[in-house]
Amino acid sequence: MSLNANFYNNRVCLNVLANSLENAKEVYEAAEGHVLVGLLSKNYPTVEAAVEDMKIYAKEINNAVSVGLGAGDPNQWKMVADISKEVQPQHVNQVFTGIGHTRGLLGQNETLINGLISPCGKPGYVKISTGPLSSKEEAGIVPVNTAIQMLKDMGCSSVKYFPMGGLKTRDEYEVVCKACAELDFIMEPTGGIDLTNFEEIVKIALDAGVKKVIPHVYTSIVDKETGNTKVEDIKELLKMVKNIA
């Protein structure tokens, strides 16, 4: 597995989408390597097609590939795991219940796997029932520290906190950030992040003492006509990162 030094050596790394290989290369260059490019499993008809395409991306952008579910869709968990086994990407997005299986298939501990947990309306607690079956039942709510330790038990690397709705869940987010700092865990805020709230969201995590923050900035910086992630917005986000990190 090839490593991207800029990703591993800095406190903040962007996670954004790319509409094409060319767009991915533009994004990677604009972010000066401080980025993971999200490629969504949902966009491929088969595991084989995804593996073939993602390996091309990995070669062109120093393996700065983040294998995604697609809007946190729990039904994509198995496809994500199977793709990741073959691609050996730098980053994997996974539902809470799919982490152990994914880590086992990867066969190594270097790839970062996040675990999807969600706000529940009560600071200090999170919803961990984000799998294909558990998400259909009554919400499984547990203390955030317990959730993080469970993630660690399964070989997880970071919290994917989704859907945040930008700063709408700020009170809950702040507690999760403090827990990540206390338990030496990576934080990935996701959902409703844009150019107007990005800096504040990242700063909350850094001020709490989180060792590494991977904010997901998706549709808010995608050009509606072309479907491309806007290079100028990536440059603006990087400028913000350099101001606060």
Image (cartoon, grey):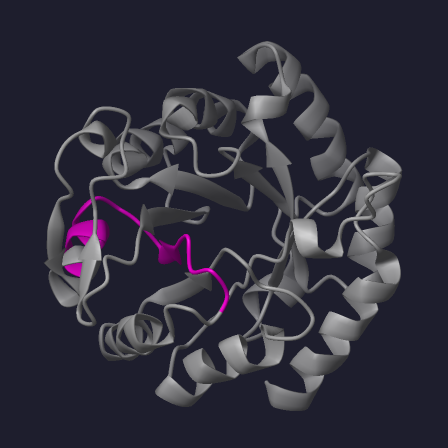
Question: Does the stretch in magenta take in 165?
Answer: yes
Q: From what the image shows, is residue 34 above or below residue 208?
A: above
Nearer-the-camera pick, 164 or 241: 164
State the count of labels: 0
Q: Which residue is drawn at 12% across and 52% down?
A: 141
| Residue 223: x %, y % from top left | 83, 48
Instruction: Magenta stretch: give its range.
Output: 149-166
| Residue 155: x %, y % from top left | 26, 46
Q: From what the image shows, is residue 152 above or below residue 194?
A: above
Nearer-the-camera pick, 7 or 245: 245
- Could you tell whether 36 is left or right of 103 in the image? right
Nearer-the-camera pick, 44 or 33: 44
Please say whether residue 229 is visible from this viewpoint.
yes
Please say whether residue 1 is visible from this viewpoint.
no
- Could you tell whether 149 is left or right of 191 in the image? left
| Residue 82: x %, y % from top left | 44, 20
Q: Which residue is drawn at 72% across and 72% down?
A: 237
Q: From what the image shows, is residue 30 above or below residue 11?
A: above
Q: The N terminus is located in which quarter?
A: top right
Q: Residue at x 26, y 76 (%)?
A: 175
Q: The C terminus is located in which quarter?
A: bottom right
| Residue 174: x %, y % from top left | 33, 78
- Could you tell whether 139 is left or right of 204 in the image? left
Q: Which residue is drawn at 38% across and 75% down?
A: 170
